[in-house]
Image (cartoon, rainbow, N blue to C red):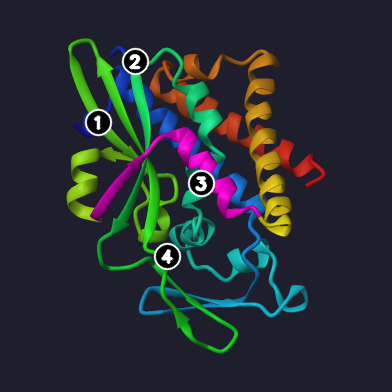
Amino acid sequence: MDPDHHPPSESAPITSQRKLSRLADILQELYYKHRQKSFDAGLSKIRFVNGIMFTYDSSGKDDALSIAELLNLCDGTKNKRTLLARFGCMEAVTLMADILMYGLVGLDCDVEVIIAKMKEPHRKFIRVDLYSVQLDNPPWHKFYRITLRDGITTHVYALDLSSAQYGYYKPLVSFETYMVERVEEIRETSLDVAKWNLLRIVERAREMLRYEWKRVCAEIIFQAVKDWEWRGHLKLRNTLCLPEKEFDEMKVKLIDYVEATLAKSNL
């Protein structure tokens, strides 16, 4: 069941499915804020051909564009989100995990990390190296599977915060729909194993330093959420229960607060 299929009225109780959908929307925006702050792909330019984004590797810092410059080259919100999500699935499942688990407090659910090979077509971007060679994209993609129990009913969802790189801009969908429409092959892992795999990938000193910076960025976001609560706002889990208009207003305030906190950080 799609949690957004029947939006609740102002007087209707907020279901567990709707709370999860709202949490997914908040997490999606926080993920984009994280990527905007920590994006370090090293690109010299991007261009668009038939709706596909071509991203060109830079030779070093001298010709690497900032994320602000790269975003200015993107036409429209969707292309900007595709760029922000570029090769970002590991950060989505690992660095956003603490905030996800914090937001799920009070909901009866299980969380797993899925590693899958996605169906054609490939990502909405193509990587071009310094020799103008178009490189194959890494075959594996990572996302969450959330099993939500609402009384006697069980719902299973895919939560994919980096799906914009495939042209999907809604973070939470039915797991069955996700599998049919997007996945070619699947294997599973737990959240702890996902973190361990990330550490294996970044074992070299330079990569470890880069990961540490990204981890600190995620911690700043998480702490900003808790600071926002402490300053007199509702707990995140209680914000998910607000009437529609109040929730939308509170979500904007939360995201703005996190963005301002990131802007003031020393990262």
Q: Earlier in the sequence, mark 1 or mark 2?
A: 2
Mark 2–mark 4 CB contact (< 8 Å):
no
- Above or below, 156 against 212 in this view is above
Q: Distance between the residues labelled 1 and 3?
A: 25 Å
Provide residue 257's location: percent of width, then percent of height. 67, 32
Closer-to-camera residue (207/132) = 207
Q: Quick check: 117 left or right of 184?
A: right
Question: What amino acid does circle 4 point to?
Answer: Pro
Label 4: element kind:
loop
Mark 1–mark 2 CB contact (< 8 Å):
no
Label 1: element kind:
strand
Residue under label 4, please give it. 138
> Considering the image in quadrants, where does the N terminus appear?
top left
Residue under label 1, please give it. 156
Which quadrant of the view contains residue 3?
A: top left
Q: Which of marks 2 and 3 is nearer the N terminus?
A: 2
Q: How crowded is mark 3: few (under 14 residues within 10 Å), some or many (20 or more)?
A: some
- Span colored in magenta: 184-203
Residue under label 2, please give it. 108
Residue 267 on the magenta span: no
Provide residue 37's location: percent of width, then percent of height. 67, 50
Closest to the camera, between mark 2 and mark 4, is 4
Question: What amino acid does circle 2 point to?
Answer: Asp
**Residue displayed at 70% across by 73% down:** 64
